[in-house]
Image (cartoon, rainbow, N blue to C red):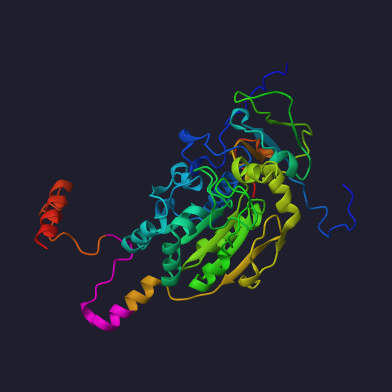
Amino acid sequence: MSKVAEQIPTEEMEHPVAPYLRMDRIPHIWCPTCGIGTVVRCYADALEHSKIDLDKVAIVSGIGCTGRVAGYMRLDAFHTTHGRAIPFATGLKLGRPELLVTVFSGDGDLVGIGGNHFIHAARRNLDILVILVNNFIYGMTGGQNAPTTPTTARTSTMPFGNFERPFNLPHLAESCGATYVARWTSLHIRRLTKSFREAISRKGFRFVEVIAPCATLYARLNKLGTGFNLMRFYHDNAVIDHGADTRDLDISFQDRIICGKFVDKERPTYSEMMHEHYRNALGDKFVPLPEEGGMIRDTGEKPDSKGKKPAKSQKRKASASKSSRK
Amino acid sequence: MKYWRKPLDFDELTIPHGIVHIIVDRCKGCGFCVEYCPKGVLEMSEEFNAKGYHPPKVVKEGECVNCNLCEMICPEFAIFSADASDNGSGTHSK
């Protein structure tokens, strides 16, 4: 019988990613050879190198394996209902425009159940970064057919193979108006990190699709081995083609995957257009949100003469009575 | 190492050295670090960790160039490399 591996004691066994994670929740629930952990590591590295204030970063995710990211990262995070990550991020960005709002979710959540929200956020060019981890299947719920499942791939709801045409996500994002569109696999760690850093520095609706292996469902149902075999497959079949026409980026079952940065352009964002429009329409009456964010207008109560802010309960009561009057 | 062309600043360059730290009980034995280490420093061990997976082990001590690839690709946050020159106290050169 084999021995038990010993932990070699070293002074300070703290992983460099530890400041970005809630270490009390680690080890995470993701399966062995799942690629989501790699994407999280790359995102944390991009945050570290962007020298961004972590108090000004918020992360929103929906339901699913990738939805767990919001719980594992030590950032202001919100774990919303299925498919509604982008609506929540929309409200967050409008209320607190100084934040870097990142939506970190899966393919089934963002383009399956929340597909309409994805389209409209891209159309409005809302200033959020969307990281979509695409494992071609609904992972957490048991391997159902997803809108990204390639044709002929087997899923638990399509045991004889999928006959639907899958989404071409970079094309969808570009045609709806995204300003930054890239696709990588979880094997391209350096390029993915660089892409995250670039996307963090841009404005507008930024979309990064990351192809990640799903060992437990996608690989098992299609007899592709484990996530390790899928990583080898990405190594052999991923083609880097920057600036490729997004119409040609369809992914067929076990076929080549075109990676790269496809779109990087500037367009006025939702908030910029809104401010400009109201400035033209209302003139001096328009009071934009302060730079540091916050509430649009205060609750009408003046702070005490001592400079103390009114207690929270009073504030809530005041706002409640105000809303009831309406 | 054999060079097909000697860099002009060859005398000034130093090859970085790293120390690999493995957090054994967090590993789920996926083998990504073993497969993708450019120097082949790691190997799957025959031993088990507390979860029953085979964690990697360092077989070529001193060959690590502190490229951080194992650290970046590990989905479990269970392996990292640190600069060997400062006794591996957690800081790493980038």
Residue A200 x/y as whole percent: 51, 61
In the displayed structure image, the side of residue A32 where residue A294 appears, left or right? left
Q: Where is residue B26 drawn, in percent x and y? A: 59, 31
Residue furthest to the top: A1
* Quarter residue A237 falls in: bottom right
On the rendered image, what quadrant is the C terminus of chain A found in? Answer: bottom left
Q: Report whether residue A106 is seen.
A: no
Residue A287 covered by magenta stretch: yes
Q: Is residue A103 magenta?
A: no
Q: Is residue B34 left or right of residue A315?
A: right
Q: How many marks?
A: 0
Extreme residue toward the front, this view? A160
User: Residue A1 appears in which quarter of the rendering?
Assistant: top right
Q: Nearer the viewer, residue B60 or A126?
A: A126
Residues B35 and A32: in front is A32
Q: Where in the figure is residue A153, as x and y percent of width and height?
A: 64, 52
Question: Does residue A242 sit above or below A76 in this rendering?
Answer: below
Tell me where the magenta segment starts and ends, as one range: A277-294
Give the left or right position of residue A303, taking residue A274 as reference. left
- In this orientation, which residue lies closer to the viewer: A161 or A9? A161
Taking the spot 44% from the left edge, 42% from the top edge, the residue there is A71
Q: Position of residue A132 (x, y in %)?
A: 53, 56
Viewer-closest of A290 and A150: A150
Query: Image point 15% across, 52% down: which residue?
Result: A315
